[in-house]
C-alpha cells in the first residue's frame, strides 16, 4: 500500500480485527499473538502496539499499531507483514488510518 503525502508529518495507525464464523475471535494477551514488521519507503520502521500485555483488556479480538510519519511531499510505499497466532479459520480484517500532525 501507500502512506499518504504528509507535508507536516503525522501518525499512521493500522488495526486488525479477527473474526471466526462471523463473530469476534477473542483471546487473552493480544501482544503475544501478533508479530509484525513494517517497511516505509524501503526502510524498516518501528511500530508501537496499542495493546501491550496483560494489563490491557482481559480479552480482545483486535490489535493496532502506530508509527509516526515524518513530512513527505509525496505518497510513500508502505508494507506491513503480520503473523498471527490463531486457528486457521480466523479471518483478519485490516484498516489503516492517517492522522495529520496538526490534528494530533
Image (cartoon, rainbow, N blue to C red):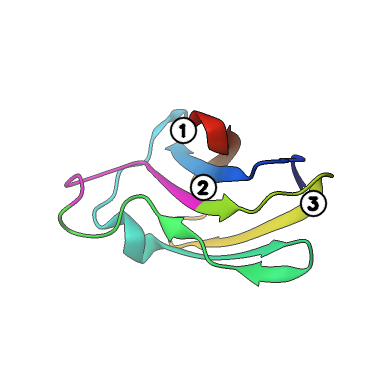
Which of disc 3 and disc 1 is earlier in sequence? 1
What's the residue at 53%, 66% (across, down)? Answer: 46
Left/right of residue 55 with respect to residue 60 in the rendered view: left
In the rendered image, which residue does mark 2 sit on? 89
The residue wearing badge 1 is: 21
Range of residues picked out in magenta: 56-66
- Residue lying at 60% horizontally and 36% vertically, measured from the top left: 98
Of residues 16 and 19, the one drawn nearer to the viewer in this rendering = 16
- Please, what secondary structure does the residue beneath circle 2 have? loop
At horizontal 38% and vertical 61% (from top left) the residue drawn is 33
Residue 90 position, x and y percent, is: 49, 46
Residue 62 placed where, x, y %? 40, 42
Badge 1, how many Cα within 10 Å: few under 14, some, many 20+?
Answer: few
Q: Which numbered disc, 3 or 2, marks the residue closer to the eye?
A: 3
Asked whether residue 86 is in view, the answer is no
CB atoms of marks 1 and 3 within 8 Å: no
Quick check: 52 above or below 22?
Answer: below
Determine which residue is flagged by label 3.
76
- Neighbours of disc 3 within 10 Å: few (<14), some (14-19), many (20+): some
When the figure is inspected, residue 83 is found, relative to residue 8, above or below; the finding is: below
Local packing at callout 2 (Cα closer than 10 Å; few below 14, some 14-19, many 20+) is few
Horizontal side of 56 relative to 73 (left or right) equals left
Q: In which image quadrant can residue 101 be found? A: top right
Amino acid at each position: 500500500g501507500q502512506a499518504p503525502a504528509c507535508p507536516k508529518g503525522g501518525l499512521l495507525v493500522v488495526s486488525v480485527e479477527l473474526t471466526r464464523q462471523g463473530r469476534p475471535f477473542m483471546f487473552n494477551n493480544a501482544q503475544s499473538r501478533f508479530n509484525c514488521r513494517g517497511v516505509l519507503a524501503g526502510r524498516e520502521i518501528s511500530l508501537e502496539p496499542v495493546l501491550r500485555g496483560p494489563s490491557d483488556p482481559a480479552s480482545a479480538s483486535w490489535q493496532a499499531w502506530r508509527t509516526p510519519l515524518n513530512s513527505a511531499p509525496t505518497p510513500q510505499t508502505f508494507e506491513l507483514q503480520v503473523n498471527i497466532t490463531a486457528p486457521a479459520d480466523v479471518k483478519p480484517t485490516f484498516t489503516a488510518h492517517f492522522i495529520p500532525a496538526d490534528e494530533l
